Structure formats: C-alpha cells, structure tokens
Image (cartoon, rainbow, N blue to C red):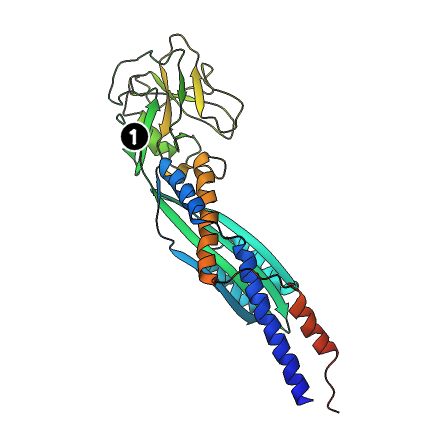
Amino acid sequence: APQIRALCSESFRNRFKEWISWAKSDIVGEKPCDMEVAKAEEDLLQLQISVDPPEYAVLEHVGYSVEKWPHVVPVLAKRLQLTADEQDELLLASMRHSGQGYFQTPISEPGRIGLRITSYRTSQVDGEIHLVYGHLRLTGSVAVQEKPHTIRCRGRTFTVLPEASPYSSTDGTDMCGVTVTLPHGATVVDTSDPDFAEICSQVIVLHGWNADLVSCRNAKRNTWPAYLTANSVAAGSCRFEDLGFMRPVGDSPLPTSFKFTGTSTSVRLLIELTSAGQLVWPTTKLSLQLTHFGELFARKHWAKQLGVSALTSDIGGFEEEKKQEKQNPVSGS
C-alpha cells in the first residue's frame, strides 16, 4: 500500500509539473519571429516612440493555500500594478477549479507611454491555488515633435493649426477655406483637461497666435468652443460655445482633420503636440501600434524564459486525478 500511494503521488506530481509547463506554453502561444517583432518596433520608431528594455518581465509559477489567497492577491496586485478590477478578477480564483485571464493596461507618464500586460492561468487543487502568469511592463520615450511656434505649459507643448507665431499681435486670415490635419500623436486641447484653466491663462490669454480666436474641444458636449486670444481686451473669454465655421472632417469620434469654412473670421485650432498623457487609448494609431508591439515582445520574451515547446496536456487532467485519489483512497490492506 505505501508503494501504491507513493506511485500515485509520483503520478500526481508528474501531472502537476505537466500542467505548469502547459500553462506557461499556453500563455506564450506561438512564438513570434524576430523579423515580426523588429517590424513592429520599426513602425513605432516611425511614430517617434523609442522603446526601452522591459522594466519587469517574468513567466512564473506560484502556489498558495486557499485560506491565504485573499491576503496574497493584494500583494501580487501591487507587484504587478494591477487595477482594482483586475485584482477582483484574480480573487475569483478561490471560487473556481481553474481559470485564466488577460489584462492589458496603458501607461501614461510625462514624456512616456507604455503598457502592462498580464496573462495568467489558475488551478485550485487539494486546498491550494496555483498561479502561472506572464507579466510585462514596457515603456518608451515619446519624442516631442520639433516644431516652431510652440508654447510650453506644465511640461506640455502647445501650438496652433494652421501654424502661426504665438507672439503675433495681428489677426491673420490664412486659415479661411483651409483643411488642417493633426500631426501623429497630437490632440486638440479639451476643455475638460484638469489643467485647462492654466492652459487658458498661460497659452491663450498671454499669446496672440496671429488670430482673434483659438478653438478647443469640449468632448463631453461634442462642441468646439472658441476663446479670445491676447489680441483682444477680453482675452481668455469664451466667444463661441460651439464654433460653426471650423468643423471636423468626417464622422469619426476622434477626428484628425478639420475644415475652416469661414471667409473672414480669424481663428486657429489649439493643439497639444505628442504627449503620453494626452493619447487616447486604444483608438489612436500610436496606441494600436504600441499594443501590437507589446504583445509580440511579451510572447517572445516569455518564450525565451520558457525555453520549451508547447505541450498539449489537458488543463483539468491532474485536477481530476487528485480528486479521484481523494474520493477513492488506497486501503491499508
């Protein structure tokens, strides 16, 4: 009987090791080729993002008792920088025999952009929860586009379209009938920006921009308010709640082109140049390219750590084996 129990335990341990290998291989999936990763990185460079070496990249297995799981998850969440919702999802592992999840969260820091990717598999067996996870934290520097006629405010860079000097005290009309397109990564200044009051006082009130007005966006109302520049005695005042003669081209909720339809009104569009904190996830081309590269890079890095080919074992195999062993214990006779 002891020999039989030993053989059963050995069989279980082998199946358990096989599940860990399967879980890691399942997380990695098909390893991307070097050329595919290099092409994705080159696409980012074209968009002026220089990717740094990963700050934290792992493919690991950990196991804890079910009782300790609620205390362990907050520690894991802090280590992996999970959101509250992601942490709650991981806590559900204590209520499941097995599970899996995939989290992807953008990172926006001053002058930087990135993302965190966490992919995991869980299995609860014999009063223990086993977690296999792959995690990657990837960031890159965002090159502020070198353009003339810009103003800095709170570490951010602003200009207008059509381009004009912020120090011009005349009201130009070169925008009339013109269509302008946002540079890569640039965004229209939104009045809901937490810093808008300071942007208005420093960027609009103190500068003429060769225009009578600069237009911004109010995303909540889907309107385009216009504010008087330093060329007016009422600088900073909202002259139009919704400017009718400067409209986005097309029906996109995130327009990138704008048509000035007025014939004499002097107005320009106030924009912020490439800034990680202002990129809209995940709909901009910039963020989509970064997400694509991050997924490829994560799988390549995890595959390197794994160093073995994918297994095809059943995720529930060793769980069922242990369950049957508990239900049908070997007798001492």
Above/below status of 329 relative to 201: below
Above/below status of 308 relative to 300: below
Above/below status of 222 relative to 81: above
**Amino acid type of the residue that numbered disc 1 sits on in the rendered structure:** Gln
Looking at this view, name the residue that lies furthest to the top: 263
The answer to which image quadrant residue 149 occupies is: top left
In percent of the image, x 45 and y 17: which residue is there?
243
* Disc 1 crowd, CA 10 A, few/some/many (<14, 14-19, 20+): some
Q: Position of residue 116 (x, y in %)?
A: 46, 51
The answer to which image quadrant residue 228 occupies is: top left
Q: Tell me the quadrant of the picture where the C terminus can be found.
A: bottom right
Q: Position of residue 238 (x, y in %)?
A: 40, 21
Q: Which residue is mark 1?
A: 202
Q: Position of residue 224 (x, y in %)?
A: 46, 22
Q: Secondary structure at mark 1?
A: helix
Residue 168 seen by the camera: yes
Residue 87 seen by the camera: no
